[in-house]
Amino acid sequence: MKKLVGFVQGSIDELANNVSWPKWSELQSSSALVLVASLIFAVVIGLIDFAFKYVLESIY
């Protein structure tokens, strides 16, 4: 049990003192970038799906 308590205390100390957390503006810009990239990826995959559907329906 003593090892577990030491591990948890060390983890809390590491997160509080040694981790460099991003600023709020950096988080917002990163989130916007992920959102835009996800939307573009979804549109591209949708277009590919539509093209395959069209080709397969014209064959069969």
Image (tube, rainbow, N blue to C red):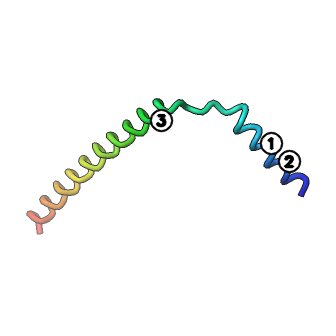
Amino acid type of the residue tagged 2 in the rendering? Gly
| Residue toward you, 35 or 44 | 35
Q: Residue at left 8%, top 63%?
A: 58
Q: Residue at left 70%, top 39%?
A: 15
Q: How crowded is mark 1: few (under 14 residues within 10 Å), some or many (20 or more)?
A: few
Closer to the chain start, of discs 3 and 1, is 1
Amino acid type of the residue tagged 3 in the rendering? Leu
| Residue toward you, 29 or 60 | 29
Disc 2 to disc 3: CB gap under 8 Å: no
- Residue 45 is situated, as x and y percent measured from the top left of the image, at 27, 51
Name the image quarter holding residue 32. Answer: top left
Residue beneath disc 3: 27
| Total number of numbered discs in the rendering | 3
Is 12 displayed left or right of 1 in the figure?
left
Res 6 label: 2
Q: Quadrant of the N terminus?
A: bottom right
Closer to the chain start, of discs 2 and 3, is 2
Residue beneath disc 1: 10
Amino acid type of the residue tagged 1 in the rendering? Gly
Q: In this view, does 26 lie above or below 44?
A: above
State the residue lying farthest toward the left.
58
Q: Is residue 18 above or below residue 53?
A: above
- Residue 7 is situated, as x and y percent measured from the top left of the image, at 82, 48
